[in-house]
Amino acid sequence: MKSINIVWHHHNVTKFDHSSQKYQKPCIIWFTGLSGSGKSTIANALESKLFGMGKHTYLLDGDNVRHGINKDLGFSDEDRIENIRRIGELSKLFIDAGIIVLSAFISPFHSDRLAARQLVESDEFIEVFVDTRLDVCEQRDPKGLYQKAREGKIAEFTGISSPYEAPTKPEIHLDTSKYDVEQSVQKIIDYLEQKGYLNA
C-alpha cells in the first residue's frame, strides 16, 4: 500500500548550486540499443573522456544495477518497465546533484524512455541510439545470451522473442557501421560542447 502521509522536503542547496559548483550543466546521457550493440563500451569510454576533462560524472550500467537496487527484478516486460522506471528516478537524483549521468540500458520500449525523459527538464535528457544491426550483435554475443535465446533457454529476450522499439528522433544517432568507439565518443563530446553542457 502506498503511503499518503509524505511531503516533499525542499533543500537549501539547489540543483543550480550543485551544477554551478561543478561548472557544468547536468544531464542524463541515455544510451539505448540491443544487447551487444556497444552501449556499455561507448559509455565507459565517454565517461573516461569526461573524467579526464575534469567533469563530474557517474555511469549506471544495466548489469551492475541488477546486482543491487534492481536485483529483485527479472526480465519479463513488466519487470523491464519497472527496471527503467527506477533507473529514471535514480538518474533524476544525479541531475539534482549536478552530475552528468550516463545510463546504459537496452530500454527496449519507447514509452519507458519517454517516461524517463519526462522526469527531468526537456534539455536534461539526451537520448543516444547505439544503432547496431541484430546480426552483428548476435555475432558478437559477448555473454552468450543470443545463443541461449535462440535455443529457447531465455524467454522474452529483446530482439529475438521480445521487441525492441528503436528511437525515431534521438538527440544522437550512432550508426556503429560508420563510427568506431573513439569516433562515437567524439560525436557525443561535440554535441555536449555545442549545447553548453561542459562549459556552464
Image (tube, rainbow, N blue to C red):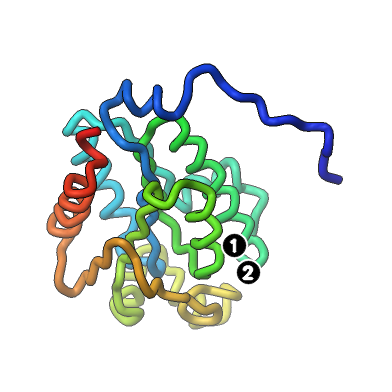
Residue drawn at the location 21% of the way across and 28% of the way down: 54
Q: Residue furthest top?
A: 12
Give 185 or 5, whichever is nearer the viewer.
5
Quadrant of the snapshot with the C terminus: top left
Q: 49 or 73, which lies in front?
A: 49
Q: Considering the numbered disc 1 on the image, is that residue within a helix, a strand or a loop?
A: helix
Please state which of residues 58 and 190 is positioned toward the viewer in this rendering: 190
Q: Amino acid at mark 1?
A: Arg
The reply to whether dot 1 and dot 2 touch (C-beta < 8 Å) is yes
SS at mark 2?
helix
Q: Position of residue 190 (x, y in %)?
A: 15, 51
Q: Residues within 10 Å of mark 2 (few under 14, many from 20)?
A: some
Tell me residue 186's x, y (percent): 14, 53
- Residue flagged by tag 2: what amino acid is it? Asp
Q: How many marks?
A: 2
Give me the residue at 24% from left, 66% from top. 174
- Which residue occupies the extreme right position in the image? 1
Query: Gap between marks 1 and 2, in whole Å?
Result: 5 Å
Asked whether, in this view, residue 135 is left or right of residue 158, the answer is: left
Q: What's the mark number on residue 77? A: 2
Residue topped by disc 1:
80
61 is higher (above) or lower (below) than 131: above
Q: Is residue 100 above or below residue 136?
A: above
Left or right of 28 in this view: 158: right
The answer to whether residue 37 is above or below residue 6 is below
Residue drawn at (49%, 61%) of the image: 113
